[in-house]
Image: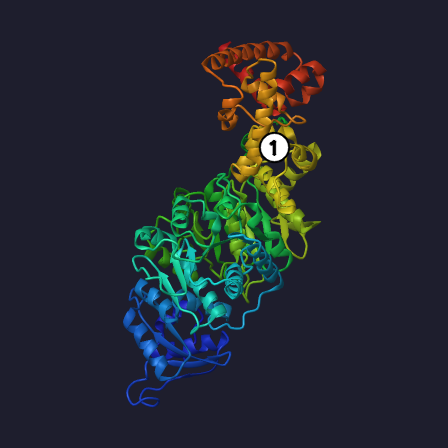
């Protein structure tokens, strides 16, 4: 057989050599005793319908090979031929292999018939990894998977009908769900299961995992892809959510006993909620690596609240337990504006600080630094995913790379073009593939050995998804290079925190002709360029308490993860040491604003605050007074933490119908009081303007003045912002 050095060379192989190549790939991926069938020998006419016979775990496989041009899609005729041929050879399992792709009809029918499909991308994965999920049997859960399964079973025995499993990328969520359902079917009389995905690429992986756990013969399988809708008579159905949603009127209500949702953080979306409401399964199971959303939509509510949250094996756990490749992380900050550093005052927003700190390099300079870093690290056959901010950003950056080294994909691109660009990246000389909204979940490129971050996602969840996606292990990949050009204090905090969670040891190293600092342990290596070290040192020396909103959210998420409950206002003041009441009031307005930003409008907390609100109203009513919103805010305050704020107190204002009513007169009074407060603020600002310039001058104010600030401005950060606005408007009017 002609030897190949690049996967793209398979297109130049003769039909016989391509069969030999496929046989070799299968043997290196775990099959044995493989042989190519001979025309006119095994059967009097042709090869009987399969090209290769091979064995795995004592099972006989019939493998049909179809060599095609890229644009020549394999159709149903080839599938029927493979099924017929496998029967003639008494093969227990059928595999259809091509160097091209399959039609959607073939994908659907193959699942129903129990045929494994290996398209060009799958074949390349096998060639690289030298392994395959196809044909695995006797699947046993790992210890952490067994813990999740046992916890789920206990919840169902206690009456739970909704579960949310949290496991990081690479920990085997799909196998865990399949093994869980296998146990559930031994306990409960459930019959029909729907596995729901949001991307077609995930569906085939899920099907293989379930078939490996449940086998063929005892259970039946079907898929709904594009316009091809299953009749759902099978035991296991696999569907893309938009296909199910579009065809809901054709489906019987309450059709499925169990629905499993992959990437379950998408479940609050309208399409999912309508599907779930219509189908109403007896048991709903969600799986995700990241259950929290930045938009405030409540993932937990979809899955029965916090009581059903199970697993909690995050990226840190996965790295510590060596389930992911070793990340070699380099923080390559944009230039610092050193002239501004000494002038920066505390109390500025994170965005303001970023604007003052960082001088963004020109895009051509950034691309040059990426290419230099790749060369200096001496990375063999570099394959980099470059995470950009938008499609416009991608289109702008591509021309700055050396011709023939960069391609790109995004969600607005036609599927054929997207597949072609990914194939070109994998098989040809392209070193970089620029993306903005793909590869966060569900899609893997095993060859990836470099991740590049060019823009701040403003989302820790997305950053960790992107990082975790690139860290999937292969036999040829023990570590991944990460180059981070995001000029943001928030990102530095996130990286520093990840390193601290993993327990790093600081060392000085020489690299990139700079005096860098490296953090290294058994799980991660983080290298800070000279500029990054400067920022870290500055933050430490001045003891800045920079708390981005994302980090503030995480503190509350982590409390919930450890305690399995949301803290009351009193507990929040007492136990959340990493965030102050001042910071909560500044970032979120109030305790209720903080809670709803992270968990949505949680029912149990809502009921507790409703009681506080009503009790406050009754207190005022006892002295024949109608409380204004600001009165309620001040009266319910706990150790400086505002329970409500003027924006969200309306969530509770309808409750006082039996306690008191806020009529138009009250609102007029409130408006007048607002004008009076504005006059008071102006007088106060005039009073302190000669002694107070910025945050460090707080110690020059009297106790009475400080008390006024705390009472009227909610937080001292808010006071500083209002004072600066007043100063600017006064300067403009002069």
Determine if residue 141 is in view. yes
Q: State the image coordinates of residue 499 (x, y, percent, origin top left).
A: 65, 48
Within 10 Å of the Cα at label 1, are there few (<14), some (14-19), or many (20+) other Cα atoms?
A: some
Depth check, front residue: 143 or 159: 159
Left or right, residue 562 beside residue 466: right
Against 3, is 594 above or below?
A: above
Coordinates of residue 149 in the picture (x, y in percent): 57, 60
* Residue pictured at 45% horizontal, 14% vertical: 664
- Specify whether residue 720 is in view: no
Label 1 sits on a secondary structure element that is helix
Q: Is residue 567 above or below residue 106?
A: above
Tell whether 719 sits left or right of 656: right
Determine whether 392 is above or below 289 in the image.
Answer: above
Image location of residue 569, percent across then percent down: 64, 32
Indicate the quadrant where residue 115 lies: bottom left
Frontmost residue, 543 versus 221: 221
Residue drawn at the location 65% of the way across and 39% of the way down: 536
Residue marked by disc 1: 338
Counting from the top left corner in percent of width and height, residue 564 is at 62, 45
Quadrant location of the N terminus in the rendered image = bottom left
Left or right of residue 119, residue 345 in this image: right
Between 264 and 486, the one lying in front of the other is: 264
- Please tell me whether residue 67 is drawn above or below residue 557 in the rendered image: below
Q: Nearer the viewer, residue 336 or 493?
A: 493
């Amino acid at each position: 057989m002609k030897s190949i050095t690049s996967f793209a060379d398979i297109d130049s192989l003769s039909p016989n050599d391509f069969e030999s190549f496929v046989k070799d790939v299968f043997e290196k991926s775990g099959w044995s005793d493989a042989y190519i069938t001979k025309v006119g020998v095994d059967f009097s006419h042709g090869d009987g319908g399969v090209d290769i016979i091979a064995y795995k775990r004592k099972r006989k496989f019939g493998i049909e090979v179809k060599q095609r041009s890229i644009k020549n899609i394999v159709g149903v005729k080839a599938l029927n031929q493979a099924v017929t041929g496998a029967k003639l050879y008494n093969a227990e399992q059928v595999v259809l292999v091509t160097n091209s792709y399959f039609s959607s009809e073939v994908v659907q029918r193959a699942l129903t018939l129990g045929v494994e499909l290996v398209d060009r991308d799958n074949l390349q994965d096998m060639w690289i990894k030298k392994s395959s999920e196809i044909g695995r049997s006797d699947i046993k859960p790992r210890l952490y998977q067994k813990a999740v399964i046992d916890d789920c079973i206990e919840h169902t025995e206690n009456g739970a009908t909704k579960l949310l499993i949290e496991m990081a990328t690479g920990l085997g969520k799909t196998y865990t769900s399949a093994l869980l359902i296998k146990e559930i079917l031994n306990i409960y009389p459930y019959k029909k299961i729907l596995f729901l995905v949001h991307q077609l690429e995930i569906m085939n992986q899920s099907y293989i995992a379930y078939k490996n756990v449940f086998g063929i013969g005892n259970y039946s399988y079907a898929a709904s892809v594009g316009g091809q809708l299953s009749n759902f008579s099978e035991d296991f159905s696999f569907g893309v959510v938009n296909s199910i949603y579009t065809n809901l009127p054709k489906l019987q209500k309450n059709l499925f006993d169990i629905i499993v949702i992959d990437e379950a953080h998408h479940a609050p979306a309208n399409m999912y909620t309508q599907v779930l409401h219509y189908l109403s399964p007896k048991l709903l199971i969600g799986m995700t690596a990241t259950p929290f959303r930045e938009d405030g939509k409540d993932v937990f509510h979809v899955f029965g609240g916090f009581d059903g949250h199970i697993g909690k094996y995050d990226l840190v756990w996965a790295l510590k337990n060596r389930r992911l490749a070793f990340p070699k992380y380099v923080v390559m900050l944009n230039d610092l504006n050193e002239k501004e550093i000494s002038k920066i005052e505390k109390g500025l927003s994170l965005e303001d600080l970023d604007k003052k700190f960082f001088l963004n390099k020109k895009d051509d300079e950034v691309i040059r630094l990426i290419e230099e870093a790749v060369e200096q690290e001496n990375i063999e056959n570099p394959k980099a995913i470059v995470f950009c901010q938008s499609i416009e950003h991608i289109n702008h950056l591509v021309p700055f790379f050396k011709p023939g080294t960069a391609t790109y994909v995004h969600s607005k691109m036609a599927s054929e073009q997207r597949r072609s660009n990914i194939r070109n990246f994998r098989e040809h000389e392209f070193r970089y593939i620029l993306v903005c909204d793909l590869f966060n979940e569900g899609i893997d490129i095993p060859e990836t050995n470099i991740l590049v971050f060019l823009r701040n996602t403003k989302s820790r969840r997305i950053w960790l998804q992107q990082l975790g996606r690139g860290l999937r292990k292969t036999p040829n990949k023990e570590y991944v290079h990460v180059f981070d050009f995001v000029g943001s204090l928030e990102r530095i905090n996130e990286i520093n925190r990840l390193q601290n969670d993993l327990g790093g040891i600081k060392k000085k190293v020489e690299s990139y002709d700079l005096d860098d600092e490296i953090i290294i342990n058994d799980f991660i290596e983080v290298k800070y360029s000279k500029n990054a070290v400067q920022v870290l040192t500055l933050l430490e020396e001045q003891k800045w308490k920079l708390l981005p909103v994302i980090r503030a959210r995480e503190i509350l998420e982590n409390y919930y993860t450890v305690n399995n409950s949301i803290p009351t206002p009193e507990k929040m003041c007492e136990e959340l040491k990493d965030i102050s009441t001042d910071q909560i009031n500044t970032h979120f307005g109030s305790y209720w604003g903080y809670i709803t930003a992270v968990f949505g409008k949680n029912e149990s907390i809502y009921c507790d605050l409703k009681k506080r609100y009503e009790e406050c109203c009754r207190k005022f009513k006892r002295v024949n007074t109608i409380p204004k919103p600001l009165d309620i805010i001040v009266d319910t305050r706990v150790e400086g933490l505002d329970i409500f704020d003027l924006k969200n107190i309306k969530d509770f204002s309808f409750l006082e119908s039996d306690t008191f009513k806020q009529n138009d007169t009250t609102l007029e009074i409130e408006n007048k009081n607002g004008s009076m407060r504005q006059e008071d603020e102006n007088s106060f600002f005039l009073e302190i303007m000669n002694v107070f310039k910025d945050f460090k001058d707080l110690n020059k104010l009297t106790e009475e003045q400080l008390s006024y600030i705390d009472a009227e401005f909610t937080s001292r950060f808010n006071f500083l912002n209002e004072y600066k606005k007043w100063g600017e408007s006064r300067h403009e009017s002069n």
